[in-house]
Image (tube, rainbow, N blue to C red):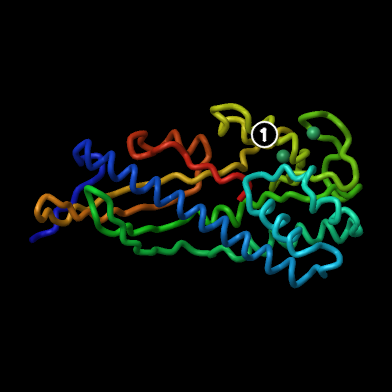
Amino acid sequence: MAELKIKLNDADDHTRAQVAYITLDYTKMFLDKLRFERLRLSVKTLRENVSDHQLSSEDMFDFATDMASKVGIIEKKKWVRNFKELPLQKQYEMMKTLQDTFYNSLPKESSTKIEPYRNNFFEGNIIHTDVYYIASANIRKYILPYVRGWFLNETCPICLENFQEGSFLLQFPCQHSLHSSCFTSLDDSQDNCRHLKCPLCRNEFWIYVTREIDVVKKSNVGGRLTVDIYLKTTAANKQMDEMLPREILARPVFIGNV
Ligand SMILES: [Zn+2]
Ligand SMILES: [Zn+2]
């Protein structure tokens, strides 16, 4: 049977809805894998660089989990008490190393993977090309402990207080920083992507995953459709999002500080 090629916009409503659902699910898994990989790498890096008497294995795992999560509110965690006993410069280097190790591990070029899928209505392959990883590696945001004189600004642009040595900051690629705990007030709004820019220079460094989808309907055997889905995950900000056709975009999938 000849392959019937269809564009998503030309597909029927049922196909469009199913494809949106399948690719959203897939994208969430793709992001979960990324967080898991970040956690694994962070634990490995900590074990290689920190001795047990400085930070217990359990603390290292908690530390790595915070680094791999969405923006970490880490001030109250148990591991922080032990971590803060380390010299400040060591704290800074350790956190910088963890984040660089992860960013450096991301692919430098786009790659395409084929993943089979199956649900009640369709089955087929997701042919997935990703450029989100590259953007993540290029637009690095760091959580770092404040060291006097090492940062561009000395005052948090959200709460207007001077930074205290050792408190955790979120640093944007423009080198401006704010308290990581003050970041949540930026993140509160429902329409949060509008607010995710550097509060000092207004540059937008926040990226999130968007999906571009194309489908190829292959065959219909006994009422069961085999549909291959061409999926591209890209990194976008608000402006880019508005340029893409609405109907092929589900809600953006936020990934926090990656
Ligand atoms: Zn603040
Ligand atoms: Zn800035």
| Number of marks | 1
Residue at left offset 79%, top offset 61%: 94
Q: Is residue 161 left or right of residue 203?
A: right
Query: Seen from this angle, which residue lies furthest bottom?
Result: 48
Residue at left offset 90%, top offset 46%: 165
Given the image, on which type of amino acid does mark 1 rest?
A: Arg
- Residue 130 at x, y percent in the picture: 44, 57
- Residue 210 at x, y percent in the picture: 45, 44
Q: Quadrant of residue 191?
A: top right
Q: Is residue 192 left or right of residue 62?
A: left
Residue at left offset 77%, top offset 41%: 177
Disc 1 within 8 angstroms of ligand 2 (CB): yes
Residue designated by label 1: 202
Q: Is residue 254 above or below residue 135?
A: above
Sort mark 1 into few (<14), some (14-19) or many (20+) by Cα contacts within 10 Å: few
- Residue 248 at x, y percent in the picture: 34, 39
State which image quarter holds ligand 2.
Answer: top right
84, 13: nearer the viewer? 84
Q: Secondary structure at mark 1?
A: loop
Quadrant of the drawing holding the N terminus: bottom left
Q: Is residue 2 above or below residue 147?
A: below
30, 201: nearer the viewer? 30
Residue at left offset 79%, top offset 50%: 78
